[in-house]
Amino acid sequence: MVWFVFAGPAAVVVAGFVTMFIAYHGADVVLSEGPAENVSRAARPSPVATTPALQARNHAATPAR
């Protein structure tokens, strides 16, 4: 019976080490450039296209007077 008590926490510890091993060995490569630098200028949204959304966000965040 004692082995059943120790088996649960031991399995969790082993699973944690396996997960850590997978995370370290399967990690993606770190990019040195930001995502905006990789996108062509034509694919970037213009500031005019985002103006209504920014105004709505600012209006919603403004406290009532």
Image (cartoon, helix red, strand yellow):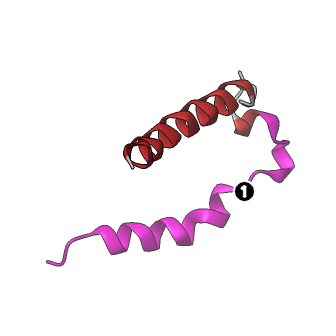
- Give yes or no for residue 35 being in the magenta stretch: no
* Above or below, comparing residue 26 to residue 53 in the picture: above
Image x and y of residue 59, in percent: 35, 73
Q: Name the residue furthest front.
A: 1
Q: Quadrant of the C terminus?
A: bottom left
Q: Which residue is mark 1?
A: 45
**Front position in the image: 35 or 10:** 10
Which residue does the image show at 72% across and 56% down from the upper left? 45
Where residue 51 sits in the image (x, y, percent)? 56, 65
Residue extending farthest left: 65
> Height in image: 17 above or below 48?
above
Q: Residue at x 65, y 32 (%)?
A: 23
Residues 28 and 31: in front is: 28
Residue type highlighted by circle 1: Pro
Q: Main secondary structure of the magenta part?
A: helix
Of helix, strand and loop, which one carries label 1?
loop
Q: Is residue 3 left or right of residue 49?
A: left
* Rendering quarter of residue 17: top right
Quarter location, residue 21: top right
**Residue closer to the observer: 39 or 13:** 13
Q: Can you give x and y, in whole percent of width and height, for residue 25 in the image?
A: 73, 25
Q: Residue furthest top?
A: 32
User: What number of labels is visible?
Assistant: 1
Classify residue 48 as left or right of residue 12: right
Q: Position of residue 41 (x, y in %)?
A: 82, 44
Q: Which residues are magenta?
A: 38-65
Q: Residue at x 61, y 64 (%)?
A: 50
